[in-house]
């Protein structure tokens, strides 16, 4: 990096990303994402909000124990229980960070906190000191900084740096700012806060106006040295600043930026696929860097130009962000050890021999149907059937579907419901519709189907279909299923969503009821 500054990358896919409705992640899924983020070489990963639920506490604890070469962070409102829970969840982390926050905009202080500015400063200082009992790496965020009075921001920031906060994060919580204004705010804070040299300044931008990356880059040009971001730009509402965009903008425009990250950009596409597979949030084809079309050239003139000299129309190389041929990894004759080792490389570890045997059985079934098995197939095998399948209330026993020109599609489904076998037969407008009607005949879930989407996991007609189903009933869940037969994949996805709906536990949202 020479004499360039380091730009720290703080990934919040597992915390702010998880706050997207329907994007919740299990403990095992978080551990898998964490291991990929470690390979990507992020500096810090925010693993969750431990006080939100016992499940998230355990997930943060598991990530803290699994990660060896990056910081692991837990979010905490500026109150005792939250900070103590975060401290406890991070006990095993090699480099633990507590991120505590309190709102500073007039509207949040008056309407949500019902606190006077003086009380907010006092609470923030108290929270930072409490967090320091657990780790010397404490980050503070004045929530809704983008709509806060800059003079008040400078006052609270000076106080928390004095109290010992090492990182000061400036969130544009509601995505209201525009690049010049946000950059100027960062510059003003760094200039006006007398002890600003004792902290690293960070930004956390939401994408409500589609400006999260632009605002983050403007802040970097004005002195911020940590960017908070998520894989694929996942996050509340319109999402957060996208990690891949900010990293590649800084890397590609080294002529403009006085800093660079330590990110191994060749891991970007794999991370993107893992996160979209786990959450069911598909990546739009024209998404920068990780969209399927991001490096595809259709217009003849562009193709001609690229063939003569790549740089006529390409500013980055596809292989530098991890696009390449699918690498064939396993086949029908691969053994249990090769299977286990490859999944370990992908960040999947089995907690028991039974779990490994189950997954290996599914792999053998797949290998009978599909000649070449790629990493993406293996990811789907454990994501969609779930390494936690032992907790499932519903299991698919058998499915028969029939569609024929001129006939009404028909399906017969048999499920195990809490260990008891139940069957139903239904007609529908298509085979998937018939299957879903049959499942509902058995379960009567009263949920509403909000999304049904199918994509191919690898290329070719022998690819597995990957189905996402979003159901709504007292909240949203996303289910996934994959199979070389898309009707079966659809049934698996629907059943997965129902299982998640039955197992879902209530969580506290971090931005509600802060103190
Ligand atoms: O958007 C936001 O303000 C946040 C804070 C908790 C940092 O996510
Ligand atoms: Zn946020």
Image (tube, rainbow, N blue to C red):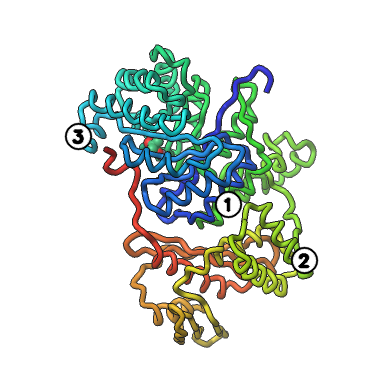
Element marked by disc 1: helix
Vertical comparison of 505 with 283: above or below: below
- Judge whether residue 479 can be spotted in this image: yes
Question: At 43% across and 29% down in the image, what residue appears?
Answer: 169
The quadrant holding residue 306 is top right
Residue carrying label 3:
114
C-alpha separation, residue under disc 2 versus residue under disc 1: 23 Å
Within 10 Å of disc 1 (Cα), the crowding (few <14, some 14-19, many 20+) is many
Q: Mark 2 points at which residue?
A: 334
Which residue is at 33% across, 20% downward? 150
User: Which residue is pictured at 59% across the width and 24% down the height?
Assistant: 6
Q: In which quarter of the image is residue 37?
A: top right
Query: Does 374 appear above or below 73?
Result: below
In the rendering, at what x and y percent does residue 12 appear?
48, 41
Q: Where is residue 274 in the image (x, y as percent from the top left)?
A: 59, 52
Q: Nearer the viewer, residue 358 or 104?
A: 358
Q: Are marks 2 and 3 in contact (CB under 8 Å)?
A: no
Closer to the camera in the image, 39 or 232: 39
Which residue has dot 1 on it? 32
Q: Relative to 45, does residue 183 appear above or below in the rendering?
A: above
> Is there CB contact under 8 Å for labels 2 and 1?
no
**Crowdedness of circle 2 by 10 Å Cα count: few (<14), some, many (20+)?**
few
Looking at the picture, tell me which residue is in the foreground, 57 or 295. Answer: 57
Q: Left or right: where does residue 255 sit relative to residue 470?
A: right
| Distance of label 1 from label 3 (alpha carbons) | 40 Å
Q: If you read the primary sequence from the N terminus, does the residue marked by circle 2 or circle 1 appear first? A: 1
* Label disc, if present, on residue 56 of the rendered structure: none
Q: Is ligand 2 within 8 Å of the beta carbon of the residue shown at mark 1?
A: no
Per the model, the C-alpha gap separating discs 2 and 3 is 62 Å
Q: Dot 3: few (<14), some (14–19), or many (≥20) neighbours within 10 Å?
A: some
């Amino acid at each position: 990096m020479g004499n360039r500054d380091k730009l720290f990358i703080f990934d919040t896919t597992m915390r702010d990303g998880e706050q997207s409705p329907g994007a919740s992640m299990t403990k095992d899924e978080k551990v898998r994402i964490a291991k990929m983020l470690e390979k990507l070489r992020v500096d810090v990963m925010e693993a969750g909000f431990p006080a939100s639920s016992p499940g998230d506490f355990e997930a943060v604890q598991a990530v803290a124990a699994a990660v060896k070469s990056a910081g692991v962070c837990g979010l905490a409102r500026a109150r005792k229980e939250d900070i103590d829970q975060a401290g406890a969840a991070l006990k095993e982390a090699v480099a633990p960070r507590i991120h505590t926050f309190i709102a500073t905009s007039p509207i949040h202080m008056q309407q949500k906190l019902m606190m006077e500015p003086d009380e907010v400063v006092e609470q923030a200082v108290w929270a930072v000191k409490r967090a320091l009992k657990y780790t010397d790496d404490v980050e503070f965020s004045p929530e809704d900084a983008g709509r806060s009075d800059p003079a008040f921001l400078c006052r609270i920031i000076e106080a928390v740096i004095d109290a010992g906060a090492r990182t000061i994060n400036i969130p544009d919580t509601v995505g209201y700012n525009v690049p010049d204004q946000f950059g100027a705010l960062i510059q003003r804070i760094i200039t006006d806060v007398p002890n600003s040299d004792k902290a690293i300044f960070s930004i956390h931008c939401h994408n409500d106006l589609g400006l999260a990356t632009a605002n983050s880059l403007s802040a970097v040009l004005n002195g911020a040295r940590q960017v908070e971001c998520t894989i694929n730009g996942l996050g509340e509402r319109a999402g957060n600043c996208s990690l891949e965009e900010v990293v590649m903008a800084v890397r590609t425009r080294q002529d403009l930026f006085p800093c660079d990250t330590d990110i191994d950009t060749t891991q970007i596409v794999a991370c993107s696929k893992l996160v979209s597979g786990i959450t069911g949030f598909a990546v739009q084809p024209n998404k920068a860097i990780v969209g399927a079309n991001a490096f595809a050239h259709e217009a003849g003139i562009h193709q001609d130009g690229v063939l003569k000299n790549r740089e006529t129309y390409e500013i980055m190389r596809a292989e530098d962000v991890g696009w390449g041929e699918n690498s064939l990894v396993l086949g029908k004759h691969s053994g249990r050890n090769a299977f286990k080792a490859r999944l370990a490389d992908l960040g999947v570890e089995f907690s028991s021999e039974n779990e490994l045997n189950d997954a290996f059985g599914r792999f053998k079934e797949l290998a009978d149907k599909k000649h070449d098995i790629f990493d993406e197939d293996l990811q789907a095998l454990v994501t969609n059937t779930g390494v936690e399948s032992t907790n499932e209330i519903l299991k698919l026993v058998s499915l028969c579907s029939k569609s024929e020109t001129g006939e009404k599609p028909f399906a017969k489904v048999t499920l195990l419901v809490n260990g008891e076998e139940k069957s139903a037969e239904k007609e529908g407008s298509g085979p998937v519709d018939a299957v879903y009607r049959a499942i509902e005949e058995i379960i009567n879930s009263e949920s509403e189907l909000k999304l049904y989407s199918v994509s191919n996991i690898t290329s070719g007609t022998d690819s597995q279909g990957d189905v996402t189903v979003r159901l709504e009933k007292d909240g949203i869940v996303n289910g996934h299923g994959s199979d070389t037969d898309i009707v079966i994949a659809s049934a698996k996805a629907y059943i997965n969503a129902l299982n998640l709906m039955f197992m879902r536990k209530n969580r506290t949202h971090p931005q509600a009821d802060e103190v």
